[in-house]
Structures are given as structure tokens and as C-alpha cells.
């Protein structure tokens, strides 16, 4: 008996081989499967389609499969009456000699970014204007070929609309590629060269907006579309064909929108900079009306950037000389190189050799830390950067300059969230998906965060080598620049889990990214965010955010910082000398929600309601941001690295646009005051006097005296009750003067 596997014999050139499940293999391709084991293996690995109604046929790498039509199949609803087929072109089919997935991914990324997207941006903007945002798309008559039909090819493309599937036949060549022809018809391709599916732009825009207001789930969305099309008598037979191609089309539609937005922003920012150069110097903010929640001039601090209570003391004379200027200017519409990773906005001005992600997009070892970025603003810049002005026009917009009478020119807050985690890829922990970045990303580069981590570790290591005397360790004096005793700071440090950097809040064994730490303005608009990779809340994340903020500010502007452990951050900066060049420009405070967990002495100094200049800023805007992003937790938990950041950037952009619409009502709510400021100051003075009064002296007879007072009060209550009853009786019996009796009864009951 032969041990060789049994081979499948082709009985006829046209008669197929029927397999279990109702599927059949055409005889012309049976030779690709050597034996029944290969056929069973293909069935077990879902090579065959699971859902197989009649209509659309699929092509696979090694065998062409079709589904057996049943009597219950619905008829095709295509206008021509023929069945709509969805199959791959030969150029997109994989074979035994096809390149690896990573190489194919990089090749497609290169085609999209270098060849397809740059011409589509201007074409998209033109069509938006001429078709009223694609509401009046007309079928183009013809395309003028200028290459003489070079590399001409016929394509049959399936077009997906809101309520229909249509077949489109076009001829493409080197001068009239498929993406250009499809975009003129209001469609977007799923592939850069030879697409087999095109999606209506209105449908893509609907999906994009829907994913901003709900959990982004392409799989469920495509399944719903398939069911809807089936109810309209359109049928798809292949598994995951619509999902894979629609996901690819949606992914690059996002890139097209990012490119057009970045193109318009670059034009507007360039014009704004030109007008700013021609305009006169900005007026002082002292001559203009103060914004809501700004400190009153009569209670403002001295002109020095330091304060006697909550502002630190300068540790060096670095502020006496201007900081070195950055080589790059602020005219760019995106953050500087120190605060923004490279993105696909390079498509606006295509470079002959744009950066291509490495093969497989894998990170084998961390790159060496880069030097800490210098200030992005120099003495010649008296305004915040374009990036900050775009993030919050109320905080950073207008002709602003440093106000020496204000506690801080800007109010910001910092907080961390450990629910936005990303699961580690078990087979390759350093694996990352293909490069994808938002044109206006708010994430700090990993290089800047790593550089800050190295500097913090080096400063702490140098400080631990200095021995301290036992007397200094046991003393409970007021620490320099803190305003509160050491014992109070130690109690605050022990009472907060966030102050313990060694406390693990997320496992690095199972998660590559453990959370987010954000810096927002007083209007709850995100300025910067950092992707955390440590299990606890490390101080170098907050320091990196502050460094990025000051790199976009003029060298004389000050910042009020709200942080749940602001006292501990300030203590560390004083102790180790972190951010010495900008330390004197920071006024520290504690977020309102966390302030009541601090010691009372710490609250007197760092509570924002007790610090002049913070107004109604509570520092809890990050909590509201985390609440708005909580719907993304399930989806982003299993996403790739670049996909994780991109989805967060798009969601933040959506929240920023919503916030812009409500900024007027925000100002109106905080501008109106129901109480006179003088009355509120008197009430605050009375509260301080009562809460800072000495405690009453203890006495052994206080308990007995309190009991006697209670007994006397009970006796008076009984006497008053008897008097009221007697007056009621006199009033009913009409004894005495009725008017006098009623008056006495009213006084007794009152």
C-alpha cells in the first residue's frame, strides 16, 4: 500500500470538484492543491468563504473559489442584470513569489505618499468648491490622455454607495491614474494603482463622523453595510473583502483630509505671519480689559516673576540673559521638531525622497536620547507660537505680552490617566504597525521624553551621593521656596498614591503603553500629551510637558500650573534643579478636587481658591477630557502604536472643534457674578479668621455644663408649649380681649 497522499483528479475541464460546505473548486485550478490534506487545510484556515450567497466571486492566492448558488438565493439587483463580481486584479493577487507583507506595505505606503496623494490634494479642494462639497458631482465626459496610452489598462471597479453597488469600467494609464479618475466621480479608491473597490466620498465622510461620536468599529460597520445591501438585493460572497478594502480606503481618506487641512493651515499661517510683520507692535495687556477669572490689578503681585507664597525663587541667573534661539522659526503650521513627530503632512510639498518607515515597522532597540530642546521663541517673538494660538485662541491668541501685574499669563493643568492602555504584542513586544501620524499631532516625540527621563535620573543620582547631616534630616523647618514645613510636605507625599513613583498602576508585562499624561489650558483644551510607558506616574513626564510648553512661549511670559501633587513637583524641582531656566516663571497650585487631601497648611498656600490669580480655574479639565475619551478604551486597547496615537489625535481634534463652538457661552458663564467682590472678600477674611483661631481650652466641667444647658432648654420648651396651649383655649373660649390673645399666640408660636 502506498503511503503517498491521494491526489485529486480533474474529471473535466469544466466540471468542478465539490467540497463539504457547498463550495466547489474549479478543475483548472485543482492542480494547485496537491492532495485532500491541502484542501482540508485550506478549509480549516478559512481560505474558503463562510457566507456564500450568489453574486460576487472572490479570487485567492493559490486557488480560485466560487460559491454554489442555491435556490434560496436572491436575484442580482445590478441595473444590467448581471451578477456583480468582486475579485482582485492580477497586480494585487499574492503568489508564491510575492514580496513579504511588510515589504508590500512599505511599497504601498510609498505609492500613496509620493505618487497618489500630492495631486489629489489640490484636486480635492477644487472639487469641494465646484461641487458644493460633493453634493453635485457630475459624471466626467472624458479624460485627455497625454501619454499616448502608455501602460494603458482596463479596470473593472466595484463602486460602493449609500444604497447601491455599481460596476465601473475605466481605462487607466500613466497620465490618467485610477485615483484621479475616481475622485472626479466622487469616489475614493482602496488601492493606489489598480483598485478593485471604490467608495463614495459621502459614505466615507459619514463613517468618519460616525466614528467620532461613537466607538470606532470598522468590522461592525462593514457588517451592517453588508446586511443593508443584502436587504436591497445586493450580495457579497467573500469573507472580509469589504472590511479590508473599506478599511484601506477610509485610512487613506483620513490622510487626504489631513493633507488638505494642513495645506490650508500653512497658507493661512503664512499670511498671518506676513500681516503680523507689517502690523505695529502689540499693545500691553494692561490697557485692555482683563479676561474672565483674571486677577484684579489692586491685588496683583509685584512685577517680579516670583512670589512670596506659591511662586518659587530663582535658582540661577539664567533668566537674566536671553535663552538661545531655535534654528527653526515659528512660521510653521505644525509644532516644532521638539514637540511634534514627523507626519504625513510632507505630502503638501512632496520631497523626492520622503521618509519611508523601516521594513516591518519594527523597533529593535531604543534610539539614543537627543539633547533637550531649546526655546522655540526668542526675544524677537513677543507672542506664543502658531501651534499654541491654534490650540486655544482665547489663551494664546491676540496681541499678548507679559503682564507684570498678573500672577501668571497663562493657566494650565496636568494630570495622568491609566485607562488608555495598549496591549503588548506577545510574539514581538517591539512590533509596531505602519507609520501613521496626524498633521497637527499633540503628542510629544519619544526622543524628548527619553531625554528628559535621562536628565531626571542623572540629577537624582548626583543628589543621592551627597550625604546629609542627621540634624538636617530631623529638623522640621520651612523648606526654601516652599512656604510650608517639611513635615507637612512629607504628609502630603504619604497621603497621595500619585506621589509614589514606584506604585504600579499598569503592568508593563502586558501593556506597551500604560497611559496618557496631558497638559491642558484653563478652557479644557488639550495643548500637549505624552504617551506613558512606565507603570507609575513619573515626574519626567510632567517635566517634558512643561519643557514643551515653554518652548512655544516668549522668554518673559509666566505660567500658573495646577497639578494634583503640585507641591511635590515643586519640591523636586527645587531639590534637584529641574528646569532651572523656566522655574521662576511657574506659579504652582493644586487641583481643586485633590486639594482637600493635602494638609491644611499646604492648602493655605497651594489651593487655587486661596491663591490670588487662579480665579475659577479648578485644574480638573483633564478629568473631563478622560471622560470624553473613555469610549475609545476597548478599541485602542488592541490597536497598533501609530493607530493608537492617530485615533486619539482625531478625537482630540473633534473635541477641540466642539469646544470652539461653546467658548462664547463659557466666557459668559464666568463673566457674570452674582455676588459683589467686596462681599466675597469679607466672607473669605471671616473664614480665614475663624479657621486660624486657636483651639478652645479643655475643661473637665464642660460636659456637665453642656448637659445642664440642655436640661434648661428642655424646661423652657415645656413652658412655652404650655403657654401656647393655654392661649389656644382662651381664644376658643373667648376669654379676655380676643385681639390681645391672638397677638400673644402669634408671638409665642413665632
Image: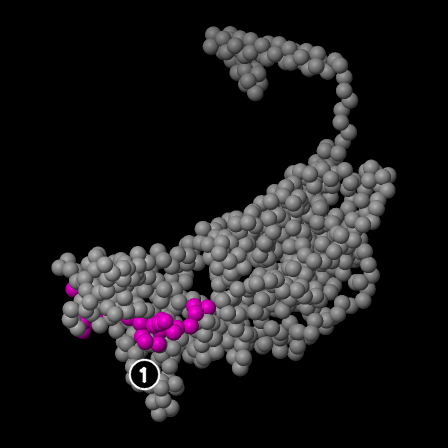
Query: According to the image, label 1 marks what residue?
Result: 153
Is residue 29 visible to us here? yes
Q: Horizontally, is 377 left or right of 334 in the view?
A: right
Residue under the image location 21 percent in, 68 percent down: 26
Q: Nearer the viewer, residue 240 or 416?
A: 240
Is residue 523 visible to us here? no
Q: Give the main secondary structure of the magenta stretch.
A: loop
Instruction: From the top left corner, tell me how far across and down residue 462 is, in percent.
Output: 78, 53
Q: Nearer the viewer, residue 115 or 131?
A: 115
- In the rendered image, which quarter contains the C terminus? top right
Extreme residue in the left direction: 71
Extreme residue in the front direction: 1
Quarter-of-image position of residue 3: bottom left
Residue under the image location 54 percent in, 54 percent down: 512
Instruction: From the top left corner, tell me how far across and down residue 132 is, in percent.
Output: 38, 73
Please say if 606 is above or below 89: above
Instruction: From the top left corner, tell me how far across and down residue 373 is, in percent.
Output: 69, 66
Q: Nearer the viewer, residue 579 or 736?
A: 579
Q: Horizontally, is 693 left or right of 667 in the view?
A: right
Please say if 732 is above or below 467: above
Q: Which residues are magenta?
A: 75-102
Is residue 709 found inside the magenta-colored segment of the image? no
- In the rendered image, which quarter contains the N terminus? bottom left
Instruction: From the top left corner, tell me how far across and down residue 514 is, in percent.
Output: 56, 51
Q: Horizontally, is 153 left or right of 359 in the view?
A: left
Residue under the image location 71 percent in, 54 percent down: 457
Helix, strand or loop at mark 1 = strand
Amino acid at each position: 500500500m502506498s503511503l503517498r497522499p491521494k491526489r485529486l483528479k480533474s474529471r473535466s475541464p469544466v466540471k468542478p470538484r465539490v467540497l463539504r460546505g457547498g463550495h466547489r473548486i474549479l478543475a483548472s485550478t485543482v492542480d494547485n492543491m496537491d492532495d485532500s490534506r491541502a484542501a482540508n487545510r485550506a478549509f480549516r484556515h478559512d481560505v474558503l468563504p463562510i457566507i456564500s450567497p450568489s453574486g460576487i466571486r472572490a479570487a485567492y492566492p493559490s486557488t480560485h473559489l466560487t460559491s454554489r448558488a442555491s435556490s434560496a438565493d436572491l436575484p442580482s439587483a445590478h441595473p444590467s442584470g448581471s451578477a456583480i463580481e468582486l475579485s482582485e486584479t492580477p497586480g494585487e493577487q499574492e503568489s508564491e513569489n510575492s514580496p513579504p507583507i511588510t515589504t508590500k506595505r512599505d511599497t504601498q505606503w510609498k505609492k500613496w505618499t509620493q505618487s497618489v496623494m500630492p495631486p489629489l490634494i489640490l484636486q480635492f479642494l477644487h472639487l469641494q468648491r465646484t461641487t458644493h462639497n460633493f453634493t453635485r458631482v457630475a459624471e466626467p465626459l472624458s479624460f485627455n490622455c497625454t501619454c499616448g496610452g502608455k501602460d494603458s489598462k482596463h479596470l473593472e471597479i466595484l463602486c460602493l454607495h449609500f444604497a447601491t453597488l455599481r460596476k465601473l469600467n475605466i481605462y487607466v494609464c500613466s497620465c490618467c491614474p485610477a485615483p484621479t479618475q475616481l475622485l472626479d466621480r466622487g469616489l475614493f479608491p482602496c488601492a493606489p494603482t489598480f483598485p478593485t473597490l471604490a467608495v463614495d466620498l459621502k459614505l466615507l465622510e459619514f463613517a468618519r463622523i460616525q466614528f467620532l461620536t461613537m466607538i470606532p468599529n470598522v468590522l461592525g460597520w462593514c457588517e451592517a453595510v453588508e446586511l443593508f445591501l443584502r436587504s436591497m438585493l445586493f450580495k457579497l460572497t467573500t469573507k472580509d473583502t469589504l472590511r479590508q478594502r473599506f478599511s484601506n480606503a477610509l485610512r487613506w481618506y483620513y490622510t487626504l483630509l489631513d493633507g488638505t487641512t494642513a495645506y490650508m493651515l500653512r497658507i493661512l499661517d503664512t499670511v498671518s505671519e506676513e500681516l503680523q510683520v507689517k502690523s505695529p507692535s502689540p499693545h500691553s495687556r494692561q490697557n485692555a480689559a482683563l479676561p474672565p477669572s483674571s486677577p484684579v490689578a489692586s491685588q496683583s503681585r509685584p512685577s517680579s516673576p516670583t512670589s512670596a507664597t506659591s511662586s518659587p525663587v530663582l535658582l540661577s541667573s539664567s533668566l537674566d540673559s536671553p535663552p538661545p534661539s531655535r534654528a527653526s522659526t515659528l512660521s510653521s503650521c505644525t509644532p516644532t521638531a521638539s514637540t511634534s513627530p514627523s507626519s504625513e503632512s510632507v505630502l503638501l510639498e512632496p520631497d523626492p525622497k520622503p521618509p519611508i518607515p523601516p521594513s516591518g515597522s519594527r523597533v529593535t532597540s531604543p534610539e539614543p536620547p537627543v539633547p533637550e530642546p531649546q526655546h522655540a521663541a526668542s526675544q524677537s517673538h513677543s507672542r506664543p507660537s502658531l501651534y499654541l494660538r491654534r490650540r486655544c485662541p482665547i489663551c494664546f491668541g491676540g496681541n499678548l505680552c507679559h503682564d507684570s501685574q498678573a500672577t501668571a499669563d497663562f493657566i494650565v493643568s496636568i494630570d495622568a490617566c491609566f485607562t488608555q492602555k495598549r496591549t503588548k504584542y506577545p510574539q514581538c513586544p517591539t512590533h509596531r504597525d505602519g507609520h501613521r501620524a496626524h498633521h497637527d499631532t499633540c503628542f510629544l516625540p519619544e526622543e524628548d521624553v527619553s531625554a528628559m527621563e535621562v536628565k531626571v535620573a542623572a540629577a537624582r543620582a548626583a543628589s543621592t551621593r551627597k550625604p546629609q547631616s542627621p540634624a538636617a534630616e530631623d529638623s522640621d523647618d520651612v523648606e526654601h521656596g516652599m512656604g510650608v514645613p517639611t513635615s507637612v510636605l512629607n504628609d502630603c507625599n504619604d497621603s497621595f498614591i500619585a506621589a509614589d513613583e514606584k506604585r504600579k498602576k499598569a503592568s508593563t508585562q502586558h501593556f506597551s503603553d500604560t497611559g496618557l499624561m496631558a497638559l491642558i489650558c484653563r478652557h479644557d483644551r488639550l495643548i500637549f500629551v505624552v504617551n506613558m510607558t512606565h507603570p507609575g506616574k513619573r515626574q519626567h513626564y510632567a517635566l517634558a510637558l512643561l519643557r514643551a510648553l515653554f518652548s512655544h512661549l516668549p522668554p518673559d511670559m509666566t505660567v500658573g500650573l495646577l497639578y494634583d501633587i503640585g507641591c511635590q513637583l515643586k519640591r523636586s524641582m527645587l531639590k534637584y534643579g529641574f528646569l532651572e531656566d523656566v522655574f521662576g516663571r511657574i506659579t504652582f497650585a493644586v487641583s481643586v478636587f485633590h486639594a482637600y487631601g493635602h494638609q491644611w497648611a499646604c492648602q493655605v498656600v497651594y489651593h487655587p481658591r486661596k491663591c490670588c490669580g487662579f480665579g475659577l480655574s479648578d485644574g480638573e479639565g483633564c478629568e473631563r477630557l478622560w471622560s470624553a475619551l473613555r469610549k475609545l478604551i476597548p478599541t485602542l486597547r488592541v490597536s497598533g502604536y501609530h493607530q493608537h496615537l492617530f485615533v486619539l489625535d482625531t478625537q482630540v481634534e473633534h473635541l477641540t472643534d466642539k469646544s470652539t463652538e461653546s467658548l462664547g457661552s463659557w466666557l459668559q458663564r464666568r463673566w457674570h457674578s452674582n455676588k459683589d467682590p467686596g462681599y466675597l472678600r469679607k466672607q473669605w477674611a471671616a473664614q480665614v479668621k475663624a479657621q486660624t483661631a486657636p483651639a478652645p481650652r479643655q475643661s473637665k466641667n464642660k460636659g456637665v455644663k453642656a448637659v445642664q444647658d440642655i436640661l434648661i432648654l428642655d424646661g423652657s420648651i415645656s413652658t412655652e408649649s404650655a403657654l401656647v396651649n393655654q392661649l389656644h383655649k382662651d381664644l376658643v373660649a373667648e376669654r379676655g380681649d380676643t385681639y390681645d390673645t391672638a397677638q400673644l399666640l402669634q408671638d409665642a408660636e413665632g
